[in-house]
Amino acid sequence: MSLLTGPVVLAGRSAQSRVVFGPHETNLGTARALSERHVAYYERRAAGGAGMIVTETASVLASDWPYERAPLATACGPGWAATAAACHPYGALVLAGLGHSGSQGSSAYSQEPLWAPSRVPDVVSREMPMEMEQAEIDSVVAGFAAAAELAAASGLDGVEVNAGQHALLRQFLSGLTNQREDAYGTDRAALLLEVLAVVRERIGHERVLALRLSCDELAPWAGITPEAGAELARRIAPEVDLLVVVRGSAMGTAATRPDAHTAPGFNTELCRSVRDAVEGHCAVVLQGSVVDAEPARRALSDGVADLVEMTRAQIADPEFVRKLAAGHADRIRPCTLGNQRCQVRDNRNPVVSCIAEPRSGHETRDRPVGAADGAAARGGRPVLVVGGGPAGLEAARVLALRGHPVRLVEAAERLGGTLHLAARIPGRERLARLAHWLTAEVERLGVTVETGTRPSAAELEAAAGGLVLATGSVPGPRDYTVHEGATVLDVADVLGAPEPAAALPEGPVAVYDTVGDAVAVGVTELLAAAGRTVTVITRDQVVGTQLAVTGDLAPANSRLQQAGVVQARRSVLREVHPDHVVVTDALTGVRTEMPCAALVHCGHRLPDPAAPPAGAVPAGDRVAPRTVYEAVLEGRRAALAVSGADAATVLPAVPVREFQVVS
């Protein structure tokens, strides 16, 4: 792995590895400035071996305010300087992400019109932008120049100009959005070239000038095609030091950062063609769900790219590169590509994090879990963990890291709990990797594991004060009538069967979804793929409303339609009969009968109702059944509580610099 983990020189500056931590929304900011939380977040990746860190893209003009906590370049100087000071000692280069979102922004915060090359409404917001005149174009160029100058003065190693997914500069490059008849229309690259020229002038040749460029808008009827993208890259390459090849446009925002329904490394061939086109005039970065070490190494050795952007991989495991370089590839915490906590561009302003590593994004608030925080209790008291799902496994792992002898007891025959069930769902297969990683870690740390058994009442009583209870959940209540002879199965029972479709009687199947997440959509797809006739019933206007958070809402509904699934939207389930179900319209109350030989219930669950032993610390679904993120987080917090440490203590923004593989 030396090619991936070894150093690389750009613009005369040496980066400790060829792994890039790319720009992404975090919601870590204070107002529109980078905060101490940003600094700690980036430093943790630098300490973990990232060769280059590109900070969250900052708007170059105040009127461009695409989301509430979007950084503004003029407010980022102190944060940039603090980030550089924190990351440079490890050998990481730090670049400022700079951009303007144009018609893909928002007028909700600025209360000003959106800017665009032409009067083409955005396909998502449907808002009509104003067509930029020369004065607005000049102000954008000046904004990039001033931001680049500030970044250099703040001690950064360069800047990355955004002409990718959410970018005004891409909008000028594309026939989808640029319908001008002036010089900026006859040569759609004119504005980008102007911006690159002034940025280079302000930062000089001794700093890195990087460009994030959409080389395929996935709209061949009028947008940037791969062939046009390669030709554009050939033209631009002499002006930059680094080119990050991305895809996507306003026509398909989910395509830039898809979940696991899209194969990892999806930009590989696009990147290869672009690297061939630039003919060595600049270094090229592969981007696009690259989250595993071997494909990243292969991309470098095969000449696909010179560096690899592995952002989500390093959110999941900040020590990714260090572990790899140390020969511990098997200890890298896997990225599940679920987008459940790392995609945060929504109106609730969630903080960036990871279902497998909940300390990501919370570095200044959540305590490190292992010996590196100086608080490990060597020879600590024995602890019994009951339940081997994600909460119990994480509790056992953290307790073992902190020096406690741990016994883990699981009633099932294997560890992992609902992670294995969820991994049966299409697009969620990588959750099994998290189950395997947690299992391997507790075994490596010497946890005594007993499966297929339950602790006795005497054992539970004896463990008081050193007992974590992570015994999971049971199906919740059902607010509909089930008539005699009707078949109703909980989704967990269906997914737990060797062949889910075979667990149901012959005939049409109805899936009732009261949650709106990936579960009902996934089991519906699974059954449809097995040849079953499926109807999905939901009270919502669209199926899988919660998938908007992960970017899979539109793709999921498209997949269901292509699979021939009947969608009973705005419907409330009232009765289940042996051969049909009765639903009513959520607004009008009109009753409808639908053929159904079996119903799969995808509803909320309830904690294990068994009375907890005295002194037990509950975790995960035993507290309240939610997602993997809460299970892992609460398993960790339960372990810290039993170990006598505060789980959420405000810590200094700058963590210790001495590296140890403990996370």
Image: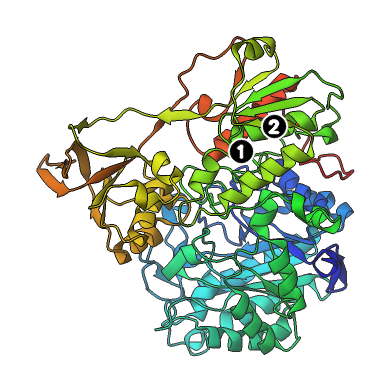
Image coords of residue 529 (percent x, y): 36, 61
Give the SS element for disc 2: strand
Residue drawn at x 84%, y 70% as measured from the top left: 8
Image coords of residue 431 (percent x, y): 57, 49
Total marks drawn? 2
Marking on residue 415:
1
Q: Amino acid at mark 2?
A: Val
Q: Residues within 10 Å of mark 1 (few under 14, many from 20)?
A: many
Image quarter in which the N terminus is found: bottom right
Residue drawn at x 48%, y 17% as measured from the top left: 610
The one nearer the camera, 416 or 249, is 416
Image coords of residue 49 (percent x, y): 81, 56
Marking on residue 174:
none
Q: Quadrant of residue 230?
A: bottom right
Q: Amino acid at mark 1?
A: Leu
The one nearer the camera, 38 or 530, is 530
Image coords of residue 532 (percent x, y): 29, 57
- Check if mark 2's residue and mark 1's residue have beta carbons within 8 Å: yes
Farthest residue, direction left: 590
Question: Looking at the image, what colour scheme do you see?
Answer: rainbow
Taking the image as shown, residue 350 lies to the left or right of residue 252, namely right
Residue 28 seen anywhere in this rendered image of the structure: no
- Quote the CA–CA distance across marks 2 and 1: 9 Å
Image quarter in which the C terminus is found: top right
Residue 283 seen anywhere in this rendered image of the structure: yes
The relative height of residue 403 versus residue 228 in the rendered view (above or below) is above
Which residue was labeled with disc 2?
A: 449
Give the SS element for disc 1: loop
Q: Quadrant of residue 583?
A: top left
Residue drawn at x 50%, y 13% as measured from the top left: 611
Dot placed on the residue nearer the N-terminal end, 2 or 1: 1
